[in-house]
Amino acid sequence: MAAGAARPAEPLLALPAAERLLVAELFVSLQGESTHAGRPCFFIRLTGCHLRCGWCDTAYAFHGGSWWRVADLVSEAARQGLPLVEVTGGEPLLQPGVFPLLARLADAGHEVLLETSGSLDISGVDLRVRRIVDLKCPGSGEVTANRWENLAHLRASDELKFVVADEADYLWAREVIREHGLGARCPVHLSPVHGALDLPSLAAWILRDRLPVRLTLQQHKLIWGAEAKGV
């Protein structure tokens, strides 16, 4: 389900920033990644990102979108009738309204996932939310944006993701995982850039190094294709 026609912005812009959000799209799909892969999920994709990863597949969410009240998004999640809800982007933590949205979704009884680039502070996110945090490998072009302080805030219920473009990215991720003992903190995913990395090679490297990770493919791209939106 797409977000639909743009809503009149002026009344919503008069609201405090914590009560409104700029939304790129709303849709129901199968969760494509994380330990919840394959589960039906309601997605709230927010507009805007301050990073420009070289392999980004959601650049259409950098701009545009429609303003929504936080309360209306919670109501829409209830209307969809799914227990699992993910808030993603773009970079959702750029908007102040995301923090009350996450808390209110959890209050309503949803299992709530937050997907974030890992470049912004995650410590203020409601404790009931499962935070899926990226660590940007060198191949992304944004490795200097990693907020390493976030590692101290990780809980067993959170997840880490490394998007790997090549062997250099894999070796970098391997050393970060080992140096910080990440495999013992929470689930860690290595996700290859779609179509850019030989999967048998990546699998062989993980097995060779006995790395405590999950090789995660983007299921939605395998099902509907790499260019499909709203899936």
Image (tube, grey):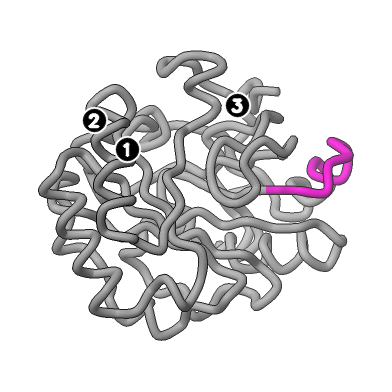
Q: Tell me how far mark 1 sits from mark 3, CA to CA.
A: 34 Å
Amino acid type assigned to the residue bearing label 2 in the image: Leu
Above or below, 145 against 44 in this view is below
Amino acid type assigned to the residue bearing label 3 in the image: Ala
Above or below, 128 against 86 in this view is below
Reply yes or no: does residue 65 show up in magenta.
no
Q: Quadrant of the C terminus?
A: top right
Q: Position of residue 97 (x, y in %)?
A: 59, 61
Q: Is residue 177 or residue 74 the one in the foreground? A: 177
Q: Locate residue 223 relative to residue 143 in the image: left or right.
A: right
Which range of residues does the magenta coloring cover? 76-85
Q: Which residue is mark 3?
A: 6
Q: Position of residue 100 (x, y in %)?
A: 67, 67
Q: Tell me how far mark 2 sits from mark 3, CA to CA.
A: 38 Å
Q: Residue at x 78, y 51 (%)?
A: 74
Amino acid type assigned to the residue bearing label 1 in the image: Pro
Of the two numbered discs 2 and 3 on the same chain, state the one appearing first in sequence. 3
Q: Quadrant of the N terminus?
A: top right
